């Protein structure tokens, strides 16, 4: 259309009323608007996936901030962690030569020790159901002991603080991971895969992984927490007070401890302690400070050039 207008000699600002031109402009505008609509529609699908995860996390945070009791949630966390670990156990005790099963059981044992302050007995891992029952009971017993140490009121507050802190930390890490996934998910279309479906699938897997880490970190912190005794606080305060009077340089303390020989310090430095060494020269008090003859500006220069002093060294 632009070429046709130029050949017809149309000037800038002149009204165009031909039906062909009007239909062409309307068609181009419709295509552009349709493309923009498809882009917004795709973005909305991605946002819906993130919004569903966001609503789930915010609902949990709201319950904690409202002061609800989350002790049962910790018990559920313990049971879920042990159940997930027990589901991967192999009956290696009946087949000692199975290296793969032994390696798998050892990795599960290391994982449980990282979460729970408990020793994992290898002989109990032969039966997954028995192991799950015994280990869950031991973990719940430790949880009950912590509550008896802290007291019910303090324990409820500690549970909320720990869980809220862990959720916030893991949620921020999850958001960064989802942003990285979103940036490259469009390339899946070259492999004949729907980016939306791939984003939903991998996003759900990442959300489940985040939930697992929340359970592990919250339980691990609670079961390893110990109340601070009053005498420990007193000792800490004493250490703080002592650290406040420490000198920045070690020479300061040695200077205070050094005995003073006289109230009036000697003006002459001790032999060998002259800070300027051999560079210090003491002028003879009987000789004048400056005995050189002063040269006038019009006198011959003392350097022997034959020029006047004001045009040579005195310039």
Image (cartoon, rainbow, N blue to C red):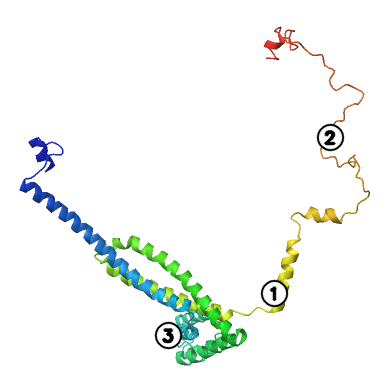
User: In this figure, which residue is indicated by the disc labeled 3?
Assistant: 87
Q: Mark 1 or mark 3, which has the lower sequence index?
A: 3
Near mark 1 (Cα within 10 A), the count class, few <14, some 14-19 or many ≥20, is few
Answer left or right for 238 relative to 264. Answer: left
The image quarter containing residue 200 is: bottom left
Look at the picture and state if 24 lies above or below 274: below
- Return the mark for residue 233: 1
Q: Nearer the viewer, mark 3 or mark 2?
A: 2
Q: Mark 1 or mark 2, which has the lower sequence index?
A: 1
Quadrant of the image containing the N terminus: top left
x, y (%) of residue 173? 44, 67
Count the marks: 3
Answer left or right for 146 relative to 17. Answer: right
x, y (%) of residue 259? 90, 54
- Mark 1 to mark 2 CA distance (whole Å): 57 Å
Quadrant of the image containing the C terminus: top right
User: In this figure, which residue is indicated by the disc labeled 2?
Assistant: 278
- Mark 3 to mark 2 CA distance (whole Å): 84 Å
The image quarter containing residue 264 is: top right
Please give the name of the residue rendered at 56% of the width and 89% of the height, measured from the top-left corner.
141
Please give the name of the residue rendered at 50% of the width and 76% of the height, measured from the top-left corner.
163
x, y (%) of residue 262? 94, 48
Please indicate, yes or no, whether residue 164 appears anywhere in the rendered image.
yes
């Amino acid at each position: 259309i632009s070429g046709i207008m130029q050949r017809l000699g149309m000037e800038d600002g002149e009204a165009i009323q031909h039906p062909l031109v009007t239909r062409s402009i309307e068609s181009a505008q419709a295509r552009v608007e349709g493309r923009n609509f498809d882009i917004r529609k795709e973005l909305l699908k991605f946002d819906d996936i993130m919004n569903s995860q966001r609503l789930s996390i915010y609902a949990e945070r709201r319950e904690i901030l409202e002061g609800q009791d989350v002790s049962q949630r910790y018990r559920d966390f313990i049971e879920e962690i042990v159940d997930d670990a027990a589901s991967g156990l192999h009956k290696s005790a009946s087949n000692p030569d199975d290296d793969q099963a032994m390696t798998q059981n050892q990795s599960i044992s290391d994982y449980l020790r990282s979460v729970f302050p408990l020793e994992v007995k290898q002989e109990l891992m032969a039966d997954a159901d028995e192991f799950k029952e015994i280990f869950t009971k031991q973990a719940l017993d430790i949880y009950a002991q912590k509550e008896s140490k802290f007291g019910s009121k303090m324990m409820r507050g500690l549970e909320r603080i720990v869980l809220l802190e862990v959720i916030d930390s893991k949620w921020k890490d999850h958001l960064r991971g989802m942003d990285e996934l979103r940036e490259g998910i469009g390339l899946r279309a070259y492999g004949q895969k729907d980016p939306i479906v791939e984003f939903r699938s991998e996003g759900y897997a990442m959300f489940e992984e985040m939930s697992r880490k929340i359970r592990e970190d919250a339980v691990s912190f609670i079961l390893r927490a110990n109340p601070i005794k009053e005498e420990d606080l007193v000792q800490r305060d004493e250490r703080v007070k002592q650290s406040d009077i420490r000198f920045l340089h070690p020479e300061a303390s040695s200077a205070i401890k050094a005995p003073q020989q006289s109230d009036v310090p000697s003006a002459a430095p001790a032999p060998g302690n002259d800070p300027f060494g051999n560079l210090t020269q003491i002028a003879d008090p009987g000789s004048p400070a400056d005995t050189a003859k002063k040269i006038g500006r019009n006198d011959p220069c003392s350097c022997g050039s034959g020029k006047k002093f004001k045009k040579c060294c005195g310039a």
